[in-house]
Amino acid sequence: MLKTKPASRYRFRDVRREDFPLLAQWLAEPHVARWWGEPSTELGSIEEAMTSEETRPMIVELDGKPIGYLQSYDPHLEEGHPYQDQPKGTLGIDISIGIPELTDKGHGAAIIRQFTSELFADGAKRIVIDPDPENLQAIRAYEKAGFRYVDTRTSIYGPAHFMALDAPGETDLP
């Protein structure tokens, strides 16, 4: 009997220039602005990442409608990145749900579960995420998605509640 893969609930696509007005709107939303920097600075970073080797900026869609921003990055490709102590094959992710009405509905954990599953299928060994220690809503979502607390670090953005999720079957990672 053939097993069919269930349809993915979310779609991840690369950021396009025409997404910038929507990204600017999301970055200005209080629930996003609290954890991200000045919108024009963040948009500049996203624009730079669109052509970078180490970061992939993406839009999260639900039923064809953009609902959030997601990026993955390889800390080993960025000179001096503080997470280079992680094993090769580690990717970092960052996520924000842009639409306030869609927060606290389980989308964050569900998006992360689907996205990390896709990253593991593509060969990632570990996924890390680093919310602000005061961002309890994000930490809960990441725990629901299977992430575990590793330690508290200081990133270029300040204190970070450093968390990791290992690929299924990866038991020898530090």
Image (spheres, rainbow, N blue to C red):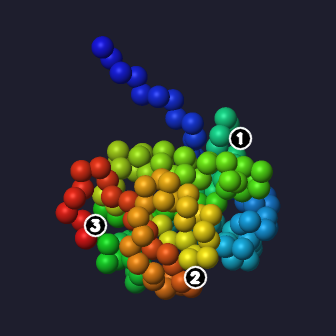
Q: Which mark is residue 84?
A: none
Residue of label 3: 88
Gap between marks 3 and 1, in whole Å? 34 Å
Q: Earlier in the sequence, mark 3 or mark 2?
A: 3
Q: Which label sits on residue 157?
A: 2
If the image is split into quadrants, where does the N terminus sit? top left
Front in this rendered view, residue 1 or 151: 151
Q: Residue furthest top?
A: 1
Could you tell me the amino acid type at mark 3? Lys
Where is residue 24 shown, x and y percent of the image? 77, 63
Q: Residue at x 68, y 37 (%)?
A: 64
Question: Of discs 3 and 2, which sits in the foreground?
Answer: 2
- Of the numbered discs 3 and 1, the one sitting upstream in the chain is 1
- Left or right of 30 in this view: 72: left
User: Cβ–Cβ below 8 Å for labels 2 and 1?
Assistant: no
Residue sitting nearer the eye, 96 or 161: 161
